[in-house]
Image (spheres, grey):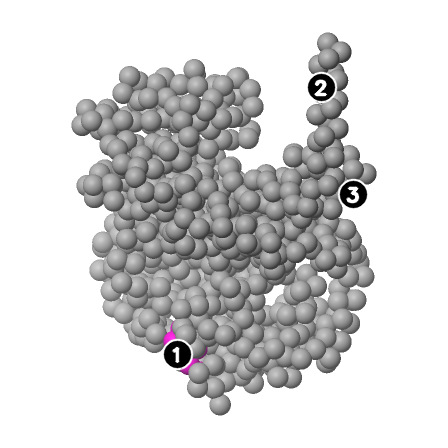
Amino acid sequence: MKQWIMWWLLIRRKHFRVAYSAKVICGTHDYKILLPTINRDFLKLIKAKIVFLQHGVLGTKNLVDINGRMFDTFYADVFVTSSTREKNIVVNDLKYPANSVLVSGLPRFDRLFLKGTKVKKQILIIPTWRDWLRDDETFKKSNYLSIYNSLINHSYFHELANEGYKILFCLHPNAQQFLHYFDIPDYVIPISQGEAMVQDLIKESCLMLTDYSSVGIDFSFLDKPVIYYEFDQVRFLGKKGSHLNLEHDLPGDVVYSEDQVIESLRRAHQRDFKISEINKEKSGKFLLKKDLNNSERVFEGIQSIGKETTFERLRYGFVFNKAFSRFRKSRHYFKIMQFVYSFMKVFCRIKPKQVIFESGIGKQYSDSPKQIYQKMLTDPFFEEYKFIWIYNGYDIEKDDRLKIIKRFSWEYFYYLATSEYWVNNQNFPYYIHKPKHTTFLQTWHGTPLKKMMNDVDSFSDKDADYVPRMNKVNAQWDYLVSPSHYATERFESAFRPKAKILEVGYPRNDVFFLSDNEKGEVLRQLRNMWGINNKKVILYAPTFRDDDKTSAGKQDFKLNLNIEAMYKALHEDYVVLFRQHAIVKTKLYIPDYFKDFFIDVSKFSDVQQLYLLADMCVTDYSSVMFDYAITKKPLLFYTYDYEDYKENLRGFYIDFEAEAPGPLLYDTDQLIDAVQHIDQVEKNYESKYQQFYNKYGYIENGTSTKKVIDAVWKNAE
């Protein structure tokens, strides 16, 4: 016993000595797990350069709380990545200094790309782990177990096995202890990751079925198809979501139900298990080079990148971010930052070719600003531009030219003070005065139906200076986008702008003029996301009521709709997608019984894609009607409070009852009847619909984004 203790002490002593004297510490996880102790005093003695090699391509799972530079739980001098896209995630989302991030490819890719492995008739099912499944009882009751049990027992896998395909079921190491709870049929072979090297399985298999694991990206690098089965996406990703737009960015088919898995599997089988061209293109964005020099590039990068400077450790580290977070919550913050902004506006130079975007007061990546930004990314004219997005999320297309900042952060004020261009679909705060040499493009966010600003007699919930104050804000606009001559007239009376009005249509509506293939891909992703399958889609998109507030003063919305009656009458043929107005702060409660029929999509920011998906739209007094009319699909108006809204709340610019391109419906029964006889409704309103379109939607033809960019940037006076 004493001998063992002596050996243990000697090993520990050597471990301390090596850790203390090391010049470089490399690891695929947190470097502290390589140390003999995580005692704070000992950590202060470590002088080595810390290199984070990673253990997979990041992006799917949000890692801000795990690997974020702003916390004291994780740190690296060199952060190894596989692509420019990944570097942009590390810089923008994890907040590492750009010069600390190495784009090289992961060392393990050298083995992945070695030739000589023959692809077998072998399908690899390899889901990742769920950190909430920690004990036997929880696991036995989980949908993880029931869903994968159902999947591996599906008859199509039996058919493939009869054709000579091996079906491998490889659980994550953390799930191996629960393997005996699965009902594994004879034609499925359970594999332990200890028994087989994952990279060998990747190279041998012809198709991979995973969920959120980074091995799916590795698999796609070999030009083989991947299916991402994300039945529990909302829970797995959590409140922060993903660094990616999963449906748009992942190099495989993202599916949400067993039927969709089998459909995708059949399509891959028909292609002889070759990757689709779309997914091949997506895969390429996650990889620097497909060669055997990844380890060499990492080695050279470690040598060339130094340790963080003292300034960088302070600026990017926990202490500064914690101190600023406390300051941000202080009641003095906004007064001080207003003063700082005024100072920066005078003494900081405007940075030419720098564009700052905001949509939905920083809560959305959507609308015309998104469309303009995406067009700029592919236009050589903007190759040397820098783009700033004010956005509280993470799922923006990453680019070398992009920086994402949080609304009201110190960077928010700095970049507003120094950007040559502002692009917004609403306004910035009234106390933010535009710098003298900045150009402000106001894209706005809808065709006016309800009276606005100077056209409203009085605002009961605003102070007396509200309208004059907003007139000063609106006077800062240099360009204002209008979707029609009617809208131009309303904007002029409501806003009294000094801006040049671009009557060219809304860039956001260019999506309606995509090619059939492009539309088809969007619709496939959306249908998969909400498990709609082949049912018809009703989009219900009401506006808010000014007087509908919670006791705390937050904007509320009460659903004056009998969901149960709608379910009984319509659920076999339809699903309802419900989207609240962005200003509403409360979440609608929908009983679980109706969750597959009445689906809340309020958090889905791209409403134009919802218009593409919907077979009909139900709205009320929302400007939704003007955009949706461009699609020429049926519109129904659920106006249960029509007289009260018209007389007591806002009032309308138009004779709404006379011009509405669909029936005004006053209760659930009328709405159900209109849906059930929608073909007759279309015939009855064909003439009014065409008149409505001719007045409000005639400009839109898919070229609005180009026209706005030409006017503001390329042909600006």
Rendered image quadrant of residue 664:
bottom left
Q: Amino acid at mark 2?
A: Trp
Residue at the spot x=30%, y=58% of the render? Answer: 518
The outermost residue toward the top is: 1
Residue 539, magenta (yes or no): no
Of the numbered discs 1 and 3, the one sitting upstream in the chain is 3
* Callout 2: SS: helix
Please rate how many residues cluster around mark 1, counting C-alpha atoms within 10 Å: few if below 14, some from 14 to 19, many from 20: some
Magenta stretch bounds: 705-711
Q: Viewer-nearest of labels 3 and 2?
A: 2
Look at the numbered discs 1 and 3 and tell me whether their residues touch, using CB distance below 8 Å. no
Look at the numbered discs 2 and 1 and tell me whether their residues touch, using CB distance below 8 Å. no
User: For mark 3, what is the residue?
Assistant: 44
Tell whether 270 sits left or right of 427: left
Please rate how many residues cluster around mark 3, counting C-alpha atoms within 10 Å: few if below 14, some from 14 to 19, many from 20: few
Q: Is residue 363 visible?
A: no
Q: Amino acid at mark 3?
A: Lys
Tell whether 649 sits left or right of 206: right
Q: Amino acid at mark 1?
A: Lys
Res 404 label: none
User: For mark 1, what is the residue?
Assistant: 707
* Callout 3: SS: helix
Q: Is residue 270 above or below residue 493?
A: above
- Tell me how far mark 3 sits from mark 2, CA to CA: 27 Å
Horizontal and vertical percent position of residue 578: 44, 48
Res 7 label: 2
Q: Viewer-nearest of labels 2 and 1?
A: 2
Of the numbered discs 3 and 2, the one sitting upstream in the chain is 2
- Tell me how far mark 1 sits from mark 3, CA to CA: 58 Å
Q: Viewer-nearest of labels 1 and 3?
A: 3
- Which residue occupies the foreground of this view, 434 or 66? 66
Residue at the spot x=48%, y=45% of the render? Answer: 107
